[in-house]
Amino acid sequence: MKIVDIREKTGSLKSEMRNAFIDFSQMTVSLVAVVTDVVRDGRPVIGYGFCSNGRYAQAGILRERLIPRIRAADPKSLLDESGDNLDPFKVFAQMMRNEKPGGHGDRAVAAAALDMAVWDAVAKIADKPLWRLLSERFNGGKADDKVLVYPGGGYYYGGREIEGLKAEMQGYRDAGYRIVKMKIGGADLATDLRRMEAAIEVVGDGGLLAVDANGKFDRATAFAYGDAIAPLGLWWYEEACDPLDYALQAELCQRYPGPMATGENLFSRQDMDNLLRFGGLRRDKDWIMPDPALAYGCTEGIRIMQSAEALGWPRRRIVLHGGTQLALAMSAGLQMGGTETYPLVFQPYGGFADGVPVIDGYTTLPDAPGLGIELKQGLYAEMRALAG
């Protein structure tokens, strides 16, 4: 078998909402389709992928570097030992040929979209859900039949900060979520405290609320927020400082008594290793949150998980960021701690399969081959248009 075509396009995430750092009115996303010569039910098997929100589409890197390298490769060099399926690690190595180490960023985002599509194709050719394929290959056949999920939300909406926030949080609770997350740092501390208190009023306990500063704070502000919110007993205090400021993160972990979370803006195994070595995170209470749909995809996500374990981190302390079907499959098949989701925002890319319920904070897994993108009709329509 072989790859016969790779197609990409740029989609839009247009939204007027904002977090502490950016608004999403101009945000874009890369979509990728990997077309194979394997035919099922009269149609070619096609793998679909896309990058996570927040880092813009990467058409140039895909078109000029990564996709041409795969197209130029000997098709047999991309196959697994059986010769009947792709080997995602070989495909990954091919698209990364002639790339220097370090300097991840946008390159990691482009590679993540393409890598996701490859894994989707591999699982479809194997006629297995991706979560099951990952379980069998990397977890001794063990998998979770339900996954802890929390909604990424609580953004800043002009003119309805308190009542709008409370209505949003109540909607999540009504939809079956227990833990919810909201943004901080886009207003002053006093305003954010009122917003947090309003959210806690809805969910009933500070331990069911996570807050996310999106890396906005300097040292003094991170400390001030930490001191102010410590009595609330929050689920976690996320990305208080710049994601690469491991020294400040270590200081925060010494000062802030509650759980902290970070890692969504680290785009490689080496960056995550450095966080775990030098960021002062505590294995018994803190969380690491790589985003596979930004950080080179499932291939690098597996390496991050394995390296974190080697450094003493339990898989259950890894909660994947991004709200993608890839993150859900990895969390279940590799028995991680859970994943974010976006049931209301970043559509049609946010959220999981249509009609799959969230019950007491957990969701179940589809049994369809691949990622299950075909089970999310809005997203599948975008992918079908790309694949022609």
Image (cartoon, rainbow, N blue to C red):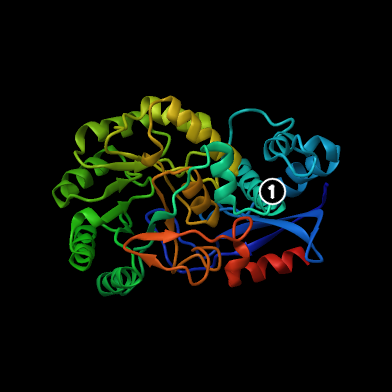
Which sits in the foreground, 252 or 42? 42
Give the residue drawn at x 32%, y 34%.
249
Residue located 48% across and 39% down the image: 266
> Residue 336: x and y, percent?
43, 43
| Depth check, front residue: 326 or 291 | 326
Which of 229 and 290 lies nearest the eye of the viewer?
290
Q: Is residue 244 above or below residue 203?
A: above
Does residue 346 lie above or below 188 as drawn? Answer: below
Going by the picture, which residue comes out furthest to the left?
A: 231
**Number of numbered callouts drawn:** 1
Counting from the top left corner in percent of width and height, residue 49 is at: 64, 55
The residue wearing badge 1 is: 122
Position above or below: 248 against 386: above
Q: Residue at the location (51% across, 46% down)?
A: 333
Image quarter hosting the C terminus: bottom right
Locate residue 177, reporting x and y percent. 33, 64
The amino acid sitting under disc 1 is Val
Q: Give the vertical position of 121 relative to 384 (above or below).
A: above
Q: Please identify the quarter of the rendering in which residue 13 is found.
A: bottom right
Q: Which one is nearer the viewer's eye here, 31 or 116?
A: 116
Which of the 4 image quadrants contains residue 103?
top right
Q: In the rendering, at what x and y percent does residue 199 appear?
A: 23, 64
Q: Residues within 10 Å of mark 1 (few under 14, many from 20)?
A: many
Q: Is residue 167 visible?
A: yes
**SS at badge 1:** helix
Residue visible at 32% across and 74% down in the picture: 159
Indicate the quadrant where residue 7 lies: bottom right
Residue 295 is at least partly visible in this image: no
Left or right relative to 176: residue 339:
right
